[in-house]
Image (cartoon, rainbow, N blue to C red):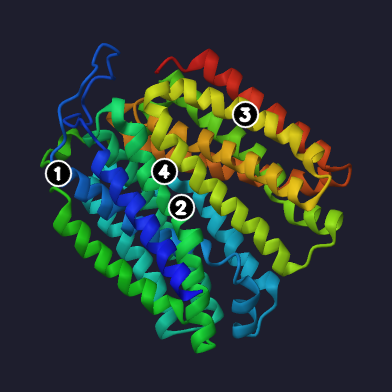
Amino acid sequence: MEGRYRFACVSVLKCITTCSSRTFEGTGLDSHSPPYAPDIKTPPAAPPRLRVQILALTLARTVLNTGHRMIYPFLPTIARGLGVDLQAVAFGVTARAALGLVSPLFGSLADTAGRRIALIVGMLAFAAGMLLVTLWPTYPALIVAMLLAMTGKLIFDPATQAFIGDKVHYTRRGLAIAVIELSWSGAFLLGVPVVGWLIARSDRWQAPFPWLGMLAVLGAGMLWRTLPPDAPHPSERPSLRQGIRIILSERAALAGLAIGVLINFANEVVSIVFGAWMENSFALEVAALGAASAVIGLAELGGEGLVAGVVDRLGKRRAVALGLGANALAGLLLPALGFSVEGALVGLFFFFITFEFALVSTIPLMTELVPHARATLMAGYVAALSLGRMPGALAGPALFEIGLLANGIVAAVLNLLALAVLLLFVRQE
């Protein structure tokens, strides 16, 4: 078992390194560059240093995402260790999600202070949360730590996407974004199992926190050494108010935010009930439901791999349209495939791989809609995703009382609405 796990770790790291070595054949676009011109066929070659920077960002973000994703599978373990009920810890998850609604307040730091500063601040905020629990393993400390970690992620993610928008040519930006997004599935497939091993080995729920805190501090140092200093032109950087004004004046940017709301609404309508559906339909126990979670993790990895392979060739707008249409179809097929456990797992894989493909494909598209306020727009996109998740979480269980088909139909309709918004209001290819 240990040998297979080590092999899986090496394989994923090789995947990240290989993708980063292929990547980013084209740099030189800064935040004031004009949108991509279709006649640019071969952008200038990227220096090897950019590949190292992309790899550093991916590894650092894997640490952040591990801290974010580990809460869900170990929620009961954490609650027992603290001597509180499950709902008390779930309150922290809810508060953390609500913080995403004000993402622009944090994410705009990359526009106002610079990309490297924002990335390092994000890592240190996350580290502070992890180390707080290490020193004071109590329920109040856990809630504060979750909010600090989320703040770090809300600063780090838009800064990363803005950095990619600055440095990677639009014709290669889909590959660059997809490589960094491997940190999301990598955290679930590699980071979370390591967290489980640390907890089981020490029999202490707080065991992963010091390790994550130290890795975050090391990650901040790595980014400080690896990333270039921010250009010394603070007068040219938009304030939060200016950034919001720029976004509100761009119809395509507003359409992109609406797509984010709709696509996450559609996903959450199904995500919130798939465990209950599998349990009710096939009388599965917790261990068997873990297999469904593994399928979702593999689907996420597959979706990110598809983005890396095809989005730059297809074109970002076309890829998003394809993903939305396929996810709508997957929502309708999911109940039909649920005639057996195997069929249900195939349906879940199809639903989540098409969602991940659609979602990750939107990111490089969004980075070029308002180049002068990239980080603020990407932070707004995080808020849009959070906004979509809230009604989905409320509507999903109510629809499930009618039957999974109702969830699938609503998910399909929301995806088709997002597709209509894309085709009508977004012209950037």
Relative to 255, say whether 164 is above or below: below
Query: Which of these two is toward me, 219 or 25?
Result: 25
Q: Quadrant of residue 294?
A: bottom right
Q: How many residues crowd around disc 3 within 10 Å: few (fewer than 14), some, or many (20 or more)? A: many
Coordinates of residue 417 in the picture (x, y in percent):
64, 23
Task: Kindly report the distance in space between the C-alpha atoms of the residues bearing marks 2 and 1.
Answer: 24 Å
Q: Which mark is residue 326?
A: 3
Coordinates of residue 131 in the picture (x, y in percent):
37, 77
In the rendered structure, which disc, 4 or 3, sits on the residue that comes first in sequence? 4
In the rendered structure, which disc, 1 or 3, sits on the residue that comes first in sequence? 1
In the rendered structure, which disc, 2 or 1, sits on the residue that comes first in sequence? 1
Q: Is disc 4 placed on a helix, strand or loop?
A: helix
Q: Which image quarter is the C terminus in? A: top left
Image side of residue 342 versus residue 175, left or right: right
Residue labelled with disc 1: 48
Foreground mark, 4 or 1, reads 1
Q: Is residue 38 visible to us here?
A: yes
